[in-house]
Amino acid sequence: MRSPSSTRFGAVFINEVRLNSKRVAPYAMALLFAGNALLWWGWGPATGRGWATNADFFIAGVLPVYSFMTLPLFTALIMADPVIRDFRTGIAPLIFSKPVKRAEYLLGKFFGNFFVLVCCQAAFVLTLFVLQAFSKQGMIVQDLKVFPYLKHFLVLVVISHLVLAAFYFTVGTLTRNAKIVYGLGVSFYPLYITYQTVLLKGLPSRWRSVLDPLLMNWGKIDRARSAELLNQLVITYDLMLIANRAMMILFAAICLTILYARFAIAERSGKVEKFSVLNLSTASERVYYGLASFTPTRHDQFGSFESKEKAMLSGIVLPKVIRVSEGFSANLKKLIAALGVEFRLLRAERSLIVLIPLAIFLSTLDLAFYQVVPEVSYSATYASSTANALLLFLVGMTVFYTGEAMHREREVGIEPVLWATPAPNYVLLLSKFFATLLLTLSLISMAGLAAIAVQFFRGHNPIEIRAYLMTYAVILLPSVVFLGSVSIAMNVLLGDKYLAYAVSIGTGGGLFYLYSIGHDHWLYNPLLYHLWDYSDLTSEGTNQATILIHRLYYLAIAGASLGLSHVFFARKSTKTLRVDGGLSGGGWAILITVGSVVSAMITGLMIGAKK
Amino acid sequence: MLVIIELKKTYPSGVQALKGISLKIHAGMFGLLGPNGAGKTTLMKIVATLLEPDAGTVEMNGVDLIARKDKTRRMLGYLPQEFGLYPTLTAEQMLDYFAKLKGVTERKQRRALIDALLEKVNLSSARKQRLGGFSGGMRQRLGIAQALIGEPELIIVDEPTAGLDPEERVRFHNLLSETASDSAVVILSTHIVSDVSNLCSNMAIIRQGTILAACTPRQAIDQLKESVWEATVPRERLAALKSKCRIISSQTFDGQARLRVISKGERPGEEFTPATPTLEDYYLDLVGQTERTN
């Protein structure tokens, strides 16, 4: 009997595991999940409430939350492009010319990547398992357990993500567009929350359990019960859960069956336009390529080249142009040109078609369908509400599209051409920064206009444009400036967009966790999350001055980030800090970085003194 | 004039790509000929400011190209071996962007330049077409168009005809020879001997990071005057001939070997007839000799 690894399915499976083992993302994910487990263990709810960190109910309670918190995004990251990669790298024809069946190929790809995903996810549960050997003051640890970790992980996490993985893999493979899958990954939370509130909320609890893929409605335990009792609880799987898991596996199988039926190995030409317009072999095209040109080289005579080939030339003379490559004005024009192209390329991102309407819809959902209680005025409440709701989208969009913009040139292969032009480094960097900023500002404007429209239709008058402008200008604008510049710096310093995404998500998740447990100090809360209300923006509030200093503090950090990005940008222009009697680009960058750091320190101290 | 002195580059993997290269390149078309992996692209990347050498200098008209990359880029037109284009932009938009980055700020001038460039590379009718739908030849022609923007004093084209069909290759040769003027240095890096013999007034042969020869194609061919012979012989005689003369090429069919050999001053056999030497003979002989020496 053949060993499974020597079958075609096994070969595809092993190759996928091998390819993933050479990527940074799986390791970064595993590290992130292990860190997450460490947080749950040491600083989670167990310690304060007397729950054992290896109690069955604790393990079964933590895993669905872990599964919900960050995993859908990572599932999208791993499962989006295994097949797309083969087409992109051009290896697809080599594979499909072998006697590999469609099912072997697709299942090998799917399970190879899903195995890697599960290995990454297992870092969480493995860390919890290892941490049984440790304890700290006030922490209860029961006797060593093995089976509950394995059982709950497989049932509560792996099956949930099997269905998500199958869905993302199917969408990615059929559309051959990883960005659509990433868009789905990003929009998972809003969609899931909408699904919970709109569809599941009104159903009986048993149906809520059956129809919830991430099991957030299953096995609600009264946590007010004594810790001793909870620590003794043994979690068993009821019929609802078994039905839910069976349904998820069935759904995954349906997705893969659809994929099998619809998958085509043919290359896609995409929108190839008017190929026939250019006929490469007609003599009417002015450039001459007569028979003589095709005679073997060794028979060519150098002397005759002069006379023959020169006669073939088109004779089109390029007009004389004036080039201005130095000075502020010339470079500003280059920046505007680069910004125009970067913004045009960002606008062409297909994920925006999903993301922008979704962000507008969700940021105005509460205002449109629920009772609005005016805080200072209706407009102030509308503006504050949309500003808060937009924050998550702005973070996601800034991080994602900055990564795309920063690495696009390398990905499409235009980098050597672009880097050989006399555009200063700051033009290349700032054009990406401003393009992303412009994109997020467009989203803010559209969400603001939608909120104004809702306010108008609900008759919540008067409409005060100033309230919107002030809220967005003070709360959102500096936040996106900060996020954009830090994202640029991260992409430059880390050199890999997926690593930058993972670090951003990890840092963002960690910070939001800290904020949620009350650690939301102004010095590490760049988005002012939970730290402001509308009255603070006016003279009526108590925090107006602090907010102003806070904004300056983060703008200074933004300046330092951009300065650092310039210093460490891979494209170098001069070796020295001074050229032609003035500062070089690198010199200016260091000066701006130092100035920004000093400003950040001063404003940081001012915030520290106030809070 | 472009002057390269003792240029060295070793990659972190340990591969010594350039082992102290020195060259003087005058205005006009200069061919840099060498097999794959010879160090051509490394050399081109260093001159095009995209790679930092470990040692050595590159100067053009008194400007240190290594230390003053900003100045270099103002005089540079570069067409890399492999490059991409933004698939969602049109040919016109792409050239407009590069023209702006190269400092052609005056709108009317820019438009006239783009029109002429598109006409020159025969892409006028595809000006509004998205680059994602361009064929390999069209992309290459757009590549040379962007390299020509702003009358560059130094033009570097790295393996421009690799992958092009014969018609596109001739088209490209025409474009390049039009580009070469009295004032600009045009470096054509290639492993295709006929590209150099067709186009270049000067050339160098590079192999394993070392310059093997630097001369004009005519001088190279003259070195083989009355030394190249051709014959069709039985395959069994190959071994005996190998000890007698240098075999440049042999094609075997139907038990016979069609040979092209070098034998200076002496006819290698009665069946051999004199042949006109070519640059390819010179190149193959030189590379073969170096291999034997190594």
Image (cartoon, rainbow, N blue to C red):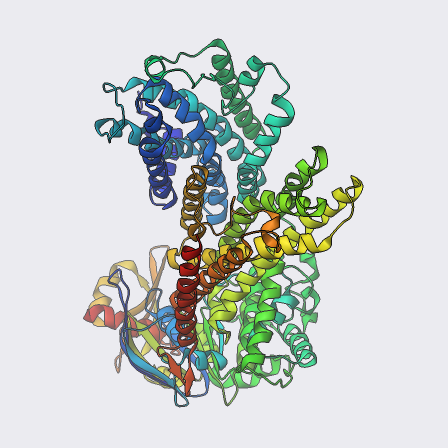
- In the rendered image, the vertical position of residue A463 relative to residue A295, given as above or below: above
User: Toward which corner of the image does residue A2 lie, by quadrant?
Assistant: top left
Q: Is residue A339 visible?
A: yes
Q: Nearer the viewer, residue B268 or A24?
A: A24
Horizontal side, residue A275 vs residue A517: left or right: right
Residue A267 x %, y %:
56, 44
Q: Nearer the viewer, residue A408 or A327?
A: A327
Horizontal side, residue A452 vs residue A532: left or right: right
Q: Nearer the viewer, residue A80 or A607?
A: A607
Residue A229 x %, y %:
35, 13
Task: Tell me the residue at 76%/45% (across/down).
Answer: A453
- In the rendered image, the vertical position of residue A325 relative to residue B259, given as above or below: below
Q: Quadrant of the N terminus of chain B?
A: bottom left
Q: Nearer the viewer, residue B88 or B131?
A: B88
Residue A163 x %, y %:
50, 26
User: Toward which corner of the image does residue A65 lie, by quadrant?
Assistant: top left
- In the rendered image, the vertical position of residue A279 relative to residue B158, given as above or below: above
Task: Tell me the residue at 54%/44% (across/down).
Answer: A392
Q: Quadrant of the C terminus of chain B?
A: bottom left
Horizontal side, residue A545 vs residue A456: left or right: left
Q: Is residue A292 visible?
A: no
Horizontal side, residue A543 vs residue A158: left or right: right
Outermost residue toward the top? A239
Total marks shown come to 0
